[in-house]
Image (spheres, rainbow, N blue to C red):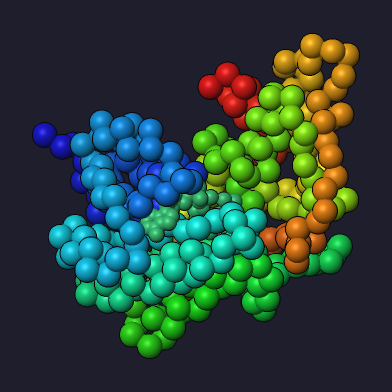
Amino acid sequence: MDERAANGKRVMVTGGCGFIGGHLLRKLLELGHEVLNVDRLTYAANTALVEEFGKSPGHTFLQADVADEPIMRLAMADFRPQWIFHLAAETHVDRSIEGPLDFLRTNVLGTGVLLEAARAMTGNNFRFIHISTDEVYGSLGLEGTFDETSQYSPRSPYSASKAGSDHLVRAWYETYGLPVIVTHCGNNYGTGQFPEKLIPMTITRALAEEEIPIYGNGCQVRDWVHVDDHVDALIAVGDRGAIGDTYDIGARDEWRNIDLVRKICGILDDLRPRASAAKYADLIRFVSDRPGHDFRYAINSDKIEAALGWKASRRIDSSLVELVENTVSP
Ligand SMILES: NC(=O)c1ccc[n+]([C@@H]2O[C@H](COP(=O)([O-])OP(=O)(O)OC[C@H]3O[C@@H](n4cnc5c(N)ncnc54)[C@H](O)[C@@H]3O)[C@@H](O)[C@H]2O)c1
């Protein structure tokens, strides 16, 4: 018999086979929640997670598109979720530049479909938690940070589509009283990230002795947070977040892209020295900058720290060796 915790909730996660969704799902199952994982299994999904989570009695998997309205309505009516964590999205900025319409369909229309279906979910302390990104705020100069009051100023098709979805979520709260919460997080790192993102791309290309491309001069700054810290923040938001509120999630861990890539190369030099005397950093190649490349992101997470008692517990400097080791020998 299923031994779900007495205070366990019925939680619908969209994008549960993605990088962050996979970590969130694992944690929710550990905590004894019953989870419906809705994922279309796009190129970005880790299909091995379907098998891993399939061993848990608390997990149900539905391969479906969040933009498919009849299926989303049926899934919610059948499962009656108390929480929805909405993570399913097209997420890679470069792909959004090459083919923006997929991003509009999944990120904007898909969010709208879920919000409409969720209007039938009343009672049971229902909450719709929308997972968004600091990229909706645009680009910072050398100084300053984003917080919940920052103006939206998205500059890529990806961030514009996420900004659009945030506005829909807020509109469904104001117009229909749907109990929503929005979160914005910085760049996540951790195991299981799709290899086109900066950290796994650097590791896999270095080990394959391929060039490691760096956009522009590599001086762009990103604010990194460990995926498990992000997951803890999301669960705190589920438990204690205020309906209608927004929480920005970060670890105050800013790195220039070039410094991060060099750091990874140095770790690889120790772990798996190249056959020649060459260093992995010799594989770095500066390539034409990404169009509209945001210069700097940095998050002020004072609000979630004070209101919900969450604080990031990891820093990239001390987590990276383990992450590189796990990627080299999983
Ligand atoms: N990765 C980051 O650094 C970061 C930072 C801040 C916010 N976010 C947000 O967190 C969420 C998850 O990001 P991630 O990096 O885990 O993404 P990911 O690209 O690793 O995974 C996305 C998942 O969504 C699924 N998906 C895509 N389109 C779908 C559709 N139409 N219907 C159903 N499922 C679909 C994919 O199959 C995949 O499993 C996204 O909403 C993203 O905007 C990510």
Q: Is residue 80 visible?
A: no
**Extreme-front residue of the structure:** 98
Left/right placement of residue 292 relative to residue 27 reads right
Q: Residue at x 59, y 38 (%)?
A: 195
- Give the percent coordinates (x, y) of residue 307: 54, 63
Q: Residue at x 48, y 46 (%)?
A: 44
**Which residue is at the front of the view, 215 or 184?**
215
User: Can you say which quadrant of the picture contains the N terminus?
Assistant: top left
Q: Is residue 269 above or below residue 264?
A: above
Residue at horizontal 81 percent and vertical 56 percent from the top = 289
- Above-or-below relation of 32 to 163: above
User: In the figure, 112 relative to 90: above or below?
Assistant: below
Q: Residue 233: x, y in percent?
A: 51, 53
The residue under the point 68% across, 43% down is: 198
Q: Seen in the image, is 230 located left or right of residue 207?
A: left
Would residue 213 be seen by someone viewing this image from the given angle?
Answer: yes
In the figure, residue 52 lies in which quadrant? Answer: top left
Residue at the extreme top of the image, as rendered: 275
Q: Residue furthest bottom?
A: 175
Q: Position of residue 84 (x, y in %)?
A: 34, 61
Please state the horizontal and vertical placement of residue 146, each as a whole percent of the image: 70, 67
Looking at the image, which is closer to me, 132 or 111?
A: 111
